[in-house]
Amino acid sequence: MKRTLIFFSVTLLIGLIAIFLFPYYAINPGVLVKGHSSLRNNCFACHSVGNGAPTENCITCHNRSEIGIKTSAGSLIEKPNSKTNLLHKSVNDIQCNSCHTEHNGLSTENAIINFTHSVLPKQMSNNCAGCHSDKKPDNYLHNSVSSDCSACHNTESWMGAEFKHELLGEKKNDCRNCHTNKIPDDGIHKGLADNIQCLQCHNTRAWKPSTFDHTKYFRFDKNHPSDCSSCHDLKENFKSYTCYNCHEHQPSKIASEHLEEGIKGFDNCIKCHRSGDEDELYGNKNRNKRDRGDEHD
Amino acid sequence: MALKFIFSKIVPSIILFISLLVLTVLIDYLLHLSGFVWVGRYLGIVGTLIIISSFIYSLRKRKIIQISTPKQLLQNHELFGWSGALMILVHGGIHFNAIIPWLALFAMVIVVASGLTGKYLLKEAKESLKDKQIELKSRNLSPNEIEKELFYSSLLVDTMQKWRKVHMPLTMIFAALALLHIIITLLLWSW
């Protein structure tokens, strides 16, 4: 028992001597940041017993209102950083070690471990441009919205934005200003007059589905599917169509059926037929006309 | 015969020791991968408490306390010593900073290795004692005479005493270094 106690005591003694003579090598939890290398054997310059490294010890050397502008020795920094200064001036109630750690390597960058926007006072966290003014893109979209970045962006990342078209105000109807590259190169869209607004068919949540109602022109069914090429040969002009692509509607057969009933001028099928049902003619008025034999003239 | 001896007696202890090191690397890697590195800090506290609880065996052996049986407590000592060491190894991670905590960690690994050696020696000595008992029975000695003979047999006691002369100082070196690390952390950390 005595022997084991001797081993314990001797080890303890050697350890204590090492701690007092070479504290940095004996107990430091990681490489001290370069700026504090002169303090590496003076733990209590930053640490207090039972209280870690309290802010009171940091501000003994670092004046919060001068951070980013002056060194801890009071001389002017060659390249002052107004953002750093603004930040540190605004966070009086925050403990330095909430964001900083000094035992994480020589580089100052490693000393910032835990900065979150939540530590900022409200008036500062709402003023994104105060720190990020250089990051606002110079384009139509960003020039059209207010300077309240948080309306779309969050503090986690710039890219995770949630854009709401309502933020554009009246400009939200001018889709072409932003979506110029997205207008499809097809007959439907190319043929639209400039005063036709995208919002008449599309909405601001998604391009598809649009509210374009083909039923106004022709109602699809299983024999008349919605694949465009069945009826529209020319992709450039969807106003052009033909019903003769189908075996059922051969020109000679159609002609004989119509002529048999005394119907002339039947080239524009959808003028009367807006579905696959041959008895469902467009409007009773048309039906009456057909019955009278003067339709299609 | 030699192979049988190696596989039945030495290999189990070696496997326990290697699995301690392999599991440490694996758990440390998983903690880094999942962003739960901070867990390692608290594993140090849990591991220390578990190792301290394993010393109930030592108190019982020295008759300072009278709970449970020495056999049961020895099993707990082995289990708690191994699992506590695993947690502390993960706590230490693969970082080479301060000397005191690293020496403490190194001493702990040596103590675990020493403990596994003791486990092997105890098993070996018990088997030798059993062989001697069979031999005494074959000489047609009465149960009383066998017991008397075995009582005077110092085989088991001698082996373990010699081992303890190494194991206890190693444990004390580990305890002193760990104590220094704990005190320094308590003093300088922000709690």
Image: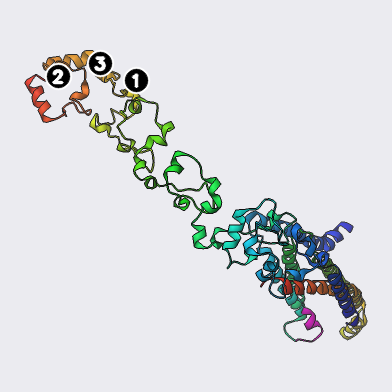
> In the rendering, at what x and y percent does residue A100 appear?
66, 61
Disc 1 vs disc 3: Cβ atoms closer than 8 Å? no
**What chain letter is assigned to the residue under label 3?**
A
Q: CA distance from mark 1 to mark 3?
A: 20 Å
| Among the two numbered marks 2 and 3 on one chain, the one whose residue lies closer to the N terminus | 3
The 10 Å Cα crowd at callout 1, few under 14, some 14 to 19, many 20 or more, is some
Q: Which residue position holds label 3?
A: A250
Q: CA distance from mark 2 to mark 3?
A: 19 Å
Q: Which residue occupies the foreground of this view, A82 or B13?
A: A82
Quadrant where the N terminus of chain A is found in the figure: bottom right
Say what amino acid the circle numbered 2 marks.
His
Does residue B170 appear in the picture of this structure?
no
In this rendering, the answer to whether B78 lies above or below A270 is below
Say what amino acid the circle numbered 3 marks.
Gln
Q: Is residue B115 left or right of residue B48?
A: right
Residue located 30% across and 34% down the image: A212
Q: Which residue position holds label 1?
A: A234
Q: Which residues are magenta?
A: B57-65
Q: Which mark is residue A69?
A: none
> In the rendering, at what x and y percent does residue A125 appear?
51, 58
> In the rendering, at what x and y percent does residue A122 appear?
49, 62
Label 2 residue SS: loop
Disc nearest the viewer among 1 and 3: 1
The 10 Å Cα crowd at callout 2, few under 14, some 14 to 19, many 20 or more, is some
Disc 1 vs disc 2: Cβ atoms closer than 8 Å? no
Say what amino acid the circle numbered 1 marks.
Leu
